[in-house]
């Protein structure tokens, strides 16, 4: 998609959202079913992803790790956003790769240490970009990519998450 195609696709949406901001509010949904052993089948909208324990918590490595899936979501969002921003501002990317790594102390997850946090203690995001763009344009590209990357901003802002349960009767 080129800049004109991107603008043509987004312009009517932007106009509609300016006129009626409520049209921009969308609730994304996914679900998963707890499976055999310690697994969960996640409906990704395209396929079923089988998640299970990371080997550092007793898994055998045959299932996806939810921590990896979080990092994969960040890579995907940052990559799509980088592509969209570069298209929108007219920066040609010869090649671009998004890398992410995160640190977890599994003592927290396993309850071995109350001092060890549960979850990522640090996440590092890196863009390797091959472009002829000037340094200031490259800086703007990365600034806008970070600003508009939904997953990155969700992680950075520590979005509140509600959690509740309800009892259901299986048929």
Image (tube, rainbow, N blue to C red):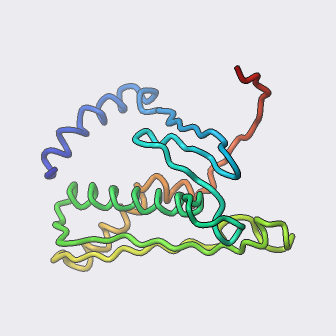
Residue ranking furthest to the bottom: 135
Q: Nearer the viewer, residue 112 or 135?
A: 112
- Which residue is found at the position 14% from the left and 52% from the top? 2
Judge from the rendering whether residue 84 lies leftward or rightward of residue 31; answer left or right. Answer: left
Quadrant hosting residue 53: bottom right
- Which residue is found at the position 49% from the left and 59% from the top? 152
Q: Nearer the viewer, residue 117 or 54?
A: 54
- Measured from the top left, where is residue 89 in percent x and y? 21, 59
- Measured from the top left, where is residue 118 in percent x and y? 74, 65
**Position above or below: 36 against 76:** above
- Measured from the top left, where is residue 22 in percent x and y? 46, 27
Judge from the rendering whether residue 160 lies leftward or rightward of residue 125; answer left or right. Answer: right
Judge from the rendering whether residue 74 lies leftward or rightward of residue 4; answer left or right. Answer: right
- Measured from the top left, where is residue 27 in percent x and y? 51, 33
- Which residue is found at the position 62% from the left and 50% from the top? 159
- Which residue is found at the position 24% from the left and 32% from the top? 12
Judge from the rendering whether residue 19 lies leftward or rightward of residue 120; answer left or right. Answer: left
**Position above or below: 139 against 63:** below
Q: How many marks?
A: 0
Q: Nearer the viewer, residue 20 or 101?
A: 101
Quarter of the figure that contains the C terminus: top right
Quadrant hosting residue 17: top left
């Amino acid at each position: 998609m080129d800049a004109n195609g991107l603008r043509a696709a987004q312009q009517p949406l932007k106009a509609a959202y300016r006129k009626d901001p409520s049209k921009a509010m969308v609730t994304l949904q996914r679900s998963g079913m707890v499976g055999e052993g310690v697994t969960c089948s996640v409906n990704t909208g395209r396929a079923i992803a089988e998640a299970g324990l990371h080997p550092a918590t007793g898994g055998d490595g045959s299932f996806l790790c939810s921590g990896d899936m979080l990092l994969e979501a960040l890579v995907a969002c940052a990559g799509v956003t980088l592509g969209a921003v570069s298209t929108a501002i007219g920066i040609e990317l010869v090649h671009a790769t998004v890398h992410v790594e995160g640190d977890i102390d599994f003592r927290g997850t396993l309850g071995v240490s109350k001092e060890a946090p549960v979850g990522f203690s640090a996440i590092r995001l890196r863009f390797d970009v091959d472009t002829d763009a000037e340094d200031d344009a490259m800086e703007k590209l990365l600034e806008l990519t970070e600003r508009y990357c939904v997953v990155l901003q969700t992680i950075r802002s520590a979005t509140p998450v509600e959690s509740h349960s309800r009892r259901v009767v299986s048929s």
